[in-house]
Amino acid sequence: MHALPGTQLLTVLPAQITEGFCRIPLAGPLKMLELPFKVPSFYVNLHRHVRSDESTALKWFCAQILTSLSDLQA
């Protein structure tokens, strides 16, 4: 998350994930803009190794993804 503020970098993310990042106070503001073209639906997958099951950071990351995507309908 800290790679973008203060740079000229950009990323393309689903709106639900972007909205979550925009609520987190960062060193600089993030902008959320609509793409100028339609994007087909897609699946979001998270693959991890069993050794990471107890990782606090990974548990937090997974919770953030689930929260961001919880409003989506399949």
Image (tube, helix red, strand yellow):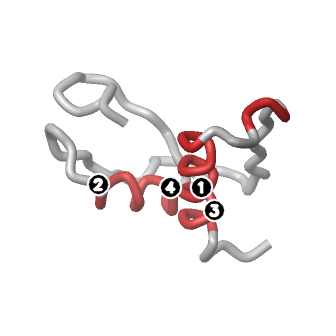
In this figure, which residue is indicated by the disc labeled 3?
66
Q: Are marks 3 and 2 in contact (CB under 8 Å)?
A: no
The crowding category of the residue bearing disc 4, from other C-alpha atoms within 10 Å (few below 14, some 14 to 19, many at least 20), is: some
Near-viewer residue (74 or 26): 26
* Residue at 78 percent of width and 51 percent of height: 43
Q: CA distance from mark 1 to mark 4?
A: 7 Å
Residue 39 point in image, percent of width and height: 64, 50
For residue 44, above or below residue 52: below
The image position of residue 50, as x and y in percent, is: 84, 34
Q: Is residue 30 left or right of residue 59?
A: left
Q: Of marks 3 and 2, which one's residue comes earlier in the chain?
A: 2
Residue under pointer 2: 24
Q: Earlier in the sequence, mark 1 or mark 2?
A: 2
- State yes or no: discs 1 and 3 in contact (Cβ < 8 Å): yes
Image position of 10 with respect to 63: above or below: above
Disc nearer the start of the sequence (1/4) = 4
**Can you give x and y, in whole percent of width and height, for residue 57 in the image?**
54, 40
